[in-house]
Amino acid sequence: MATTIPDIALNDGNTIPQLGFGVYQISPADTADSVRTALDVGYRHIDTAEMYGNEAEVGHGVRAAGLAREDVYITSKLNNGAHRPEDARAAFQATLDALRGDYIDLFLIHWPLPTRYDGDFVATWKVLEEFQQDGRARSIGVSNFQVPHLDRLAAEAEVVPAVNQIEAHPYFVNDEVREYGVKHGIVTQAWSPIAQGAVLGDPTVADLADQVARTPAQVVLRWHVQRGDVIFPKSTTPKRIEENLRIFDFELDDAAMERLTQLDRGESGRQGPHPDSFDYLPG
């Protein structure tokens, strides 16, 4: 299926495809086939993480699709158990080895973990700066960072994150963090863009979907796109993988956008853990 996915400019001179394919909670056994299906129908951005346990399978799926490495944008993230500088260096190399490549397009600190490692995510960030300097990471960024975390990086580090990957969806618009990103040139990537499916049955979403003759998921994903965020919906169903790609041939008007934004529930709409307290380390 032919489609054109817009690229978004990053603050380091690179670009990122606005729509990607996410592999969170896809089992390793299903990852390679799902990635290949996504690439076959037109996706060119895959989002993974060491803690997802499927980086190697992402690499296999990319190779199986027969595309040149430079034609596929790959994002991965640092394991929560590897924030100390030497551990971060080893973990990053393990990511490259799993993907069977010598560079990654975007590498993120997965969680700030302010209650771990004496709260020193700045030292971890400076190791990511090394990866960018030596060319093994084309771009670097963070995930789940709150405004105080970003302010601390601005005060103590040299490089501004290219992206901040955060939970965002109509039930939790997370605009304080998003607006900080706009002000400081940090692109927002929205994880859980459909709130793990929770928003799809909302009457407002259903009504708007009927009005534009699209699925509820397509309407919500289009809302994200028009807000300027990068998204990477996840599915293992080929029909839905393709369906999620077909969001660039229609638009929501201002009234529809506002109706979706007004679904915001603030903190009560958050689906995942709060970054200020989340402290999970893999066993």
Image: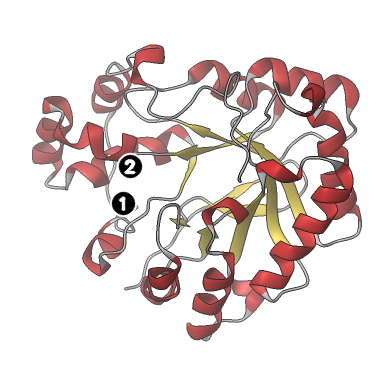
Which is more toward the observer, 175 or 26? 26
Q: Residues within 10 Å of mark 2 (few under 14, many from 20)?
A: many
Instruction: Residue at 52% x, 54% y: name it.
Output: 52
Q: Nearer the viewer, residue 134 or 82?
A: 82
On-image quarter of the N terminus: bottom left
Q: Is residue 10 visible?
A: no
Q: Amino acid at mark 2?
A: Arg
Write down the quadrant of residue 270 in the picture.
top left
List x then y, in percent, for residue 163. 65, 39
**In the rendered image, the vertical position of residue 96 relative to residue 150, given as above or below:** below
- Relative to 168, is 147 above or below? above
Q: Are marks 1 and 2 in contact (CB under 8 Å)?
A: yes
Task: From this view, report whether residue 39 is shown above or below residue 142.
Answer: below
The residue at which mark 1 appears reads as 247
**Colouring mode (rainbow / by chain / secondary structure / one colour):** secondary structure
Which residue is the site of mark 2? 222
